[in-house]
Amino acid sequence: MSSDSETSLPAPKIQLTPQEWKARLNPQEYAVLREAGTERAYTGEYTDTETEGVYECRACGAELFRSTEKFHSHCGWPSFFDPAGSDAVILREDNSLGMRRVEVLCANCHSHLGHVFEGEGYPTPTDKRYCINSISLRLKPVEGSTS
Ligand SMILES: [Zn+2]
């Protein structure tokens, strides 16, 4: 109840001050995760990754996405058609930059992950594209994965 701007969202389980986040994250990670920045297209380390595993929140380690829901969208960022669990992420309307978009946040720590787009015609089960910054994620490969 202490936050003015996020009263519509449930409180994150992990709440740190900006100073504490800066101690945990490097400047690039902080700019995306905590200030809703966007890494440049085709520069992220997981854009075309097909390694089997789980993608965790780089800020807090919560499981967010899995390689089984990752697909090649050719948009320049890692894309998923569904999160790992329905309560793993929070969606919030984002009207910045003169666009109507839906922001994707980590449900556990409310760090910025990316945006989700719907109905673009991708041949996936949901026709949703969770367009996520690589720098918001950390891949934990499955034990014994060869790629
Ligand atoms: Zn998180």
Image (tube, rainbow, N blue to C red):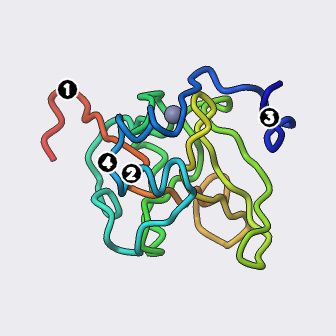
What kind of residue is marked 4?
Answer: Asn
- Measure how far apart labels 1 and 4 are at the Cα level: 27 Å
The structure residue drawn at horizontal position 46% and vertical position 37%, both measured from the top left corner, is 19
Q: CA distance from mark 2 to mark 4?
A: 5 Å
Q: Quadrant of the N terminus?
A: top right
Of all residues, the one furthest to the right in this rendering is: 8
> For the residue marked with disc 1, what is the amino acid?
Glu
Measuring 57% from the left and 49% from the top, which residue is drawn there?
112
Does label 1 or label 2 sit earlier along the sequence?
Answer: 2
Distance between mark 2 and mark 3 Cα atoms: 23 Å
Left or right relative to 43: residue 68: right
Within 10 Å of the Cα at label 4, are there few (<14), some (14-19), or many (20+) other Cα atoms? few
Which SS class for mark 2?
Answer: helix
In this rendering, would 30 be left or right of 26? right
Of marks 3 and 4, the one in the foreground: 4
CB under 8 Å between discs 1 and 4: no
Q: To which residue does mark 2 refer?
A: 29
Q: Nearer the N terminus, badge 2 or badge 3? A: 3
Residue picked out by circle 3: 9
| Circle 3 crowding by C-alpha within 10 Å: few under 14, some 14–19, many from 20 | few
Q: Are marks 3 and 4 in contact (CB under 8 Å)?
A: no
Mark 2 residue type: Glu
What crowding class fits label 2: few (fewer than 14 Cα within 10 Å), some (14-19), or many (20 or more)?
many
The residue that mark 1 highlights is 143
**Distance Cα–Cα, label 1 vs label 3:** 36 Å
The residue pinned by badge 4 equals 26
Mark 1 secondary-structure assignment: loop
Tell me, yes or no, whether the two marked residues, 2 and 4, touch with CB atoms within 8 Å: yes
SS at mark 3 in the image: loop
Q: In the visual, does 111 lie left or right of 98?
A: left
Instruction: Tell me the quarter of the picture where residue 23 sits.
Output: top left
Q: Secondary structure at mark 4?
A: loop
